[in-house]
Image: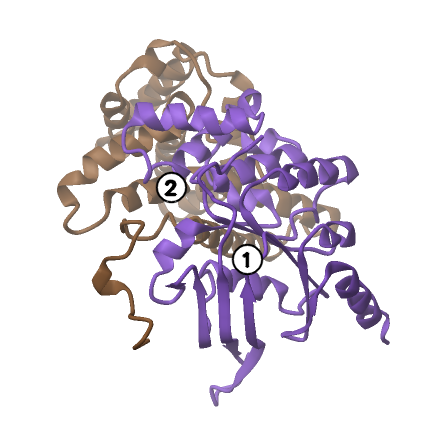
Chain colours: A brown, B purple
Amino acid sequence: MNTAGLFAAHLPGTSAVHRAPLWLKLAGVLTVGVVPWVAHSLTPLLVTLGLVLAAAGLAQLPVRRVVRSVRAIAPVLVLLLAFQWWAQGLPYAIGVVLGIANAYLAAGILTATTPVTDLLDGVVRGARPLRRLVDPEVVALTLAVVVRSVPWVAGSFASVRDAARARGLERSPRAVVVPTALHVVAYARSTGEALSARGLTDPDVPDVPDEADVPDDDTA
Amino acid sequence: MTPGSSAGGSSRIRLEGATVTVPVDGDSSRRERTILGPVDLELTERRVTVVGANGSGKSTLLRLLNGLVLPTGGSVDVDGLDTRLDGARVRRRVAFAFTDPLSQLVMPTGREDVELSLRRVHRSRVERRSAAEGVLGRFGLSHLADRSVHELSGGERQLMALAVVLATEPAVLVLDEPTTLLDLRNTALLRRLLAGLEQVLVVATHDLDLALDADRTLVVDAGRVVFDGPPAQAVDHYRALASRP
């Protein structure tokens, strides 16, 4: 299930955004994510949106991919806008939606301009000081799976919505939300199983067990 | 095409009274239901196939072999490594390929997925990239390496999934119904590829032609191995089982 948006795969290129160091891109995404928390009006959010779109343009990302990415989360944004409008008023609702859309697009630009393996290497380096607490490779793998899951979940939502529409149930939130949730759980289980089967979640042990680990045939 | 150059082509898989039980759904008294076993087997052949109806226990039997499922009774060992005690080492020796390659491929592109497999083998990024290039080249997949896995055809995806699990050169490759989602042309392609592998293969399949292409075939029914022997006789036994009302 795929929306072929910004999160689908790395789009090789030679733009300044592609060539920017990973730490700078991560700092950019972080900054975009922080703006809604510190902004007191819609202006900074609109400026951020402009900068994010400019970065997408600078990276020469196909417009249709950007549009597809936004379209994939549009139903969620519309629901969120309606709820926040009802609960907090229109300006607040627009601010929330803009903040999420900006962060989503910035993360999409990061993944579209950076090979996932470079992201993994960067996260492993960043998590190395915490290696006594957690395996940096597992942290990196978790991040990679999250990145991979975004388009899948969006695609699942779109497929379920189409199926509901085909049955004349497009107005029933239950007909969309429940199957999507079940799909996501099944997807999480199959992904976990695939990672386990490949030994990617195993501790880093030597290929040959220590002699002390091997049971003696006579006593086993 | 000769991937798995260090695989060696021999292995010993031993199941002793291996049983898998699961809790009975909706039963508060914690009753359990046996879905497989007890199974006693020693597999030393290079090509073993497993046939049986849907829900017969084939997949559970296969999952026991690389520790994806642990026996609730008895034991399973691969070349002396117990799946319960030495799961990580067993999984390095025994690769597992799922029916749906999209379950297997967790990265956006094949190249990134092969590199993911190689992360624990090659710490250096340069070495990893070079090794991944070699793996993709051996499978004839270099031209597809940077395409989204979602944009590949069913056959290309299945080949990519195999490249991904064989990148670490395991000794044994377990495949769970590898041709179920493939058309005739891709099924033939996959069979040619499997025939050229040096790894020990254990394949569960509904494709009886593929089942016959083995040194030994197991028939699984209702959680038990009900026939174990030459492929032609095993397939006849399975046909007889399937024709019962």
For residue A182, which numbered disc appears in the image?
1
> Disc 2 versus disc 1: distance between alpha carbons?
33 Å
Residue beneath label 2, please?
A89
Label 1: chain?
Answer: A
Q: Residue at x 32, y 30 (%)?
A: A119
Q: Residue at x 52, y 55 (%)?
A: A181
In the shown orientation, is residue A46 left or right of residue A38? right
Q: Give the secondary structure at mark 2.
A: loop
Label 2: chain?
Answer: A
Whole-percent x, y for residue A101 in the image: 41, 31
Q: Give the secondary structure at mark 1.
A: helix
Q: Image height check: is B22 above or below A28?
A: below
Marker count (numbered): 2
Q: Quadrant of the C terminus of chain B?
A: bottom right
For residue A150, which numbered disc appears in the image?
none
Q: Residues within 10 Å of mark 2 (few under 14, many from 20)?
A: few
